[in-house]
Amino acid sequence: MPVETLVVGLLLAILWAELTDVSPGGLIVPGYFALYVGQPLRIAATVGVALLAWAAVGLLARRLILFGRRRFVLAVLVGAVLAQAWAVLLPSLFGAPAGLRAIGLIVPGILASSLSRQKPLPVLASLVAVTTLTYAAASLAALL
């Protein structure tokens, strides 16, 4: 089921991006979010890390020449570092539940990159829509 969910998410994300001209947080992000619909803390943590990475890249962009590939790689790297720091520091500092960690190391950075290319509200709204569609389609496919 995970592979099918990721493929459905990829197809729906590319269709959504082509039809609306708004990225749903990157092409693979909705598929991963659909896999974790039953764990809302992980989705919230991933969005939180992505927003922190987006802010950090925005601050760094004021001092560095960032565009294209450089900006994308920096967003992924900052997202990975913040996701790892989130997983290590948050539980020890605040006694946070174990489920409050980001989905992978790459997903927050891809989402942060998408947030830096377009406005956050349309990206996040598209992410919710495509994740919901992906989860529904994958659940329906599992029933058949």
Image (cartoon, rainbow, N blue to C red):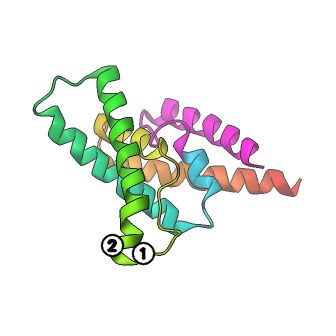
**On screen, residue 98 above or below 141:** below
**On screen, residue 65 above or below 137:** above
Amino acid carrying mark 1 in the image: Ala
Q: Is residue 23 magenta?
A: yes
Mark number for residue 96? 1
- Mark 1, Cα crowd under 10 Å, few <14 / some 14-19 / many 20+, is few
| Residue extending furthest toward the left | 63
Contact (Cβ within 8 Å) of mark 1 with mark 2: yes
Quarter-of-image position of residue 9: top right
* Residue at the image position 63 percent from the left and 67 percent from the top: 38
Q: Which residue is mark 2?
A: 93
* Residue at the image position 66 percent from the left and 42 percent from the top: 6
* Residue at the image position 42 percent from the left and 75 percent from the top: 96
The dominant secondary structure in magenta is: helix
* x and y percentages locating residue 61 in the rendered image: 17, 33
* x and y percentages locating residue 89 in the rendered image: 36, 63
Q: Is residue 113 visible?
A: no
Q: Which residues are magenta?
A: 1-29
Question: In terms of secondary structure, where does tag 2 sit?
Answer: helix
